[in-house]
Amino acid sequence: MPRATSFDKQAILRAAMLVFWQKGYHDTSMQDLVDATRLNRSSIYNSFGDKLSLYQETLNVYVRETQAQFAVALGQSTSALHALHAVFEDCLPQRPAGTQGCMHLQCKATMYHEPSIKRWLEQSQEQTLHTFEQLITLGQEEGSINKNQTARDYALHVVNLFNGYRMTSILEREPDALKVIVHNGLYILSASVFSEMIISTNDTLRE
């Protein structure tokens, strides 16, 4: 077994993350973690503390990897609205084999009662909301996203859509069907939708 001071911490955390993601926290045993990381139990405890502490560290790895995917999508987009579409469409192909849905949602469904995890979830959600709010604000300034609602309200809508999208994708694997979900969910943000609403309202008032 490798010494606790000689292993690649990030590689170990990623191996543990995949186990937690595949099996869930409660169904992951210490033996599962030993097998996945190739560290003995004492090395795991000495380096990461208890099972819950290790789980929390793997959640941070998951968030960093998700943020990296977001950064790629944002960097390749021509507008804020296009970037939102890219974030949705790019997140699923990169999901590792054997994992189900979103590790973050899995955590929220099964570990919310744990105080330290609850705090982490709240902070993570606020960070995600802030990221989307900044992007939507940019879209409203550049004209690709309408101003019918505040950037914060739209950010809440996008986060809710993203959560539902990842849950639906557990069973629905048809790419075209998933693209329809994204299109319909984000359509309300489009600047053209706001223009259509104004035209429709004006036409109604003239009648």
Image (tube, grey):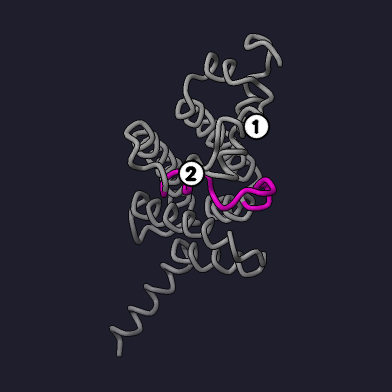
Q: CA distance from mark 2 to mark 1?
A: 17 Å
Residue 66 lies in the magenta stretch: no
Position of 187 compared to 179: left or right? Answer: left
Q: Amino acid at mark 1?
A: Ala
Q: Nearer the viewer, residue 203 or 106?
A: 106
In the foreground, 11 or 113: 113
The label on residue 15 is 1
Q: Quadrant of residue 169?
A: bottom right
Residue 29 picture location, percent across and down = 55, 35
- Asked if 139 appears above or below 20 in the picture, the reply is below
Start-end of magenta stretch = 92-109
Q: Residues within 10 Å of mark 1 (few under 14, many from 20)?
A: some
Residue displayed at 47% across by 48% down: 105
The residue beneath circle 2 is: 104
Q: Nearer the viewer, residue 148 or 45?
A: 45
Position of 46 relative to 95 (above/below): above
Determine the main secondary structure of the stretch shown in magenta.
loop
Depth check, front residue: 198 or 51:
51
